[in-house]
Image: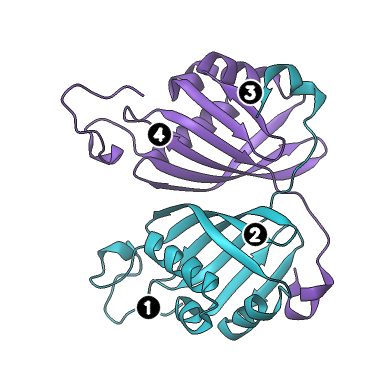
Chain colours: A purple, B cyan
Amino acid sequence: MPVLAGAPLSYPTTNLPGMMSAHEVVAAYWAAAEARDWDAFGALCADDVVYRGPQTREQVRGREAYIRFNAEGFDYEWHVAVERIVGEGQHAASWTEFTAADGTMVGLCFFDLDDDGLISRITDFWPEPYELPASRAQLVERY
Amino acid sequence: MPVLAGAPLSYPTTNLPGMMSAHEVVAAYWAAAEARDWDAFGALCADDVVYRGPQTREQVRGREAYIRFNAEGFDYEWHVAVERIVGEGQHAASWTEFTAADGTMVGLCFFDLDDDGLISRITDFWPEPYELPASRAQLVERY
């Protein structure tokens, strides 16, 4: 990861003048994805960005491959809406609602930013509905 | 949600002297859960805390019910380890690894804190492994 000349090895991204906070970077990332503005999307990612989906153990390395993955990997109409973004220093998390023809799914991502404030790592999770276990059924209500 | 007398209706929790940040509250929450210290765990939660699990549409309301849910709802040996906590103002997210006899699962939570710095809402997700869709198999590698 590139480090600015003369800068200390570690500092909060938010302290650099003119640099977006992790929260703002992730908000811009989702806005660019929804707009299919892959130039803006790629400009928020580091050259050596790494995407991981732990549920399938899939991985994409590098900005160009990651743009292609997003632009070509989902061959249906989709929309993404932000439910929550939380940012702290060079880390952030997002909770989004991803809607396609067959319904809406929740997407949960954890982001790491490099010292230039660019996204260097994305870990992406897609939780799906499941049956309530009988062992705790008497301790909850349904909504 | 209680509001301190004379305090403005909205301000960052981190500005109140002696109050823990959202990151610190969530770190203490997971430490208390791992220690089965239900008094410490409950002291971090608001009286009217609401837990929701969107995948099963289960809900638990109130501190006592929520302690019981955690203490009694999982009738097997388990351990929780924090992978990542991100906190911002009155919001936080955590990524934990939850280990039981049959393996390790990822747990992802989003937290809201009330104006007293107590946890008022927890939204809890459990993503499970699934098959990689053929539509994007040529765009990724496996790890």
Contact, CB < 8 Å: mark 4 with mark 3?
A: no
Q: Which residue is mark 3?
A: A70
Q: Please identify the quarter of the rendering in which residue B3 is found.
A: bottom left
Q: Which residue is mark 1?
A: B3
Kind of residue at disc 2: Thr
Give the CA distance from mark 3 to mark 2. 32 Å
Q: Please tell me whether residue A9 is drawn above or below residue B50 in the rendered image.
A: above
Question: Given this view, does label 4 or label 2 mark the residue nearer the observer?
Answer: 2
Q: Quadrant of residue B97 in the image?
A: bottom right
- Disc with the residue nearer the chain's start (1 vs 2): 1
Labels 3, 1: front one:
3
Q: Give the mark toward the camera: 4 or 1.
A: 4
Marks 4/1: CA distance? 35 Å
Q: Position of residue B116 (x, y in %)?
A: 38, 75
Q: Which residue is mark 2?
A: B99
* Circles 4 and 1 on the same chain: no
Rendered location of residue A27, percent (x, y): 47, 37
Among the 4 quarters of the image, the one containing residue B19: bottom left
| Residue drawn at (74%, 27%) of the image | A77
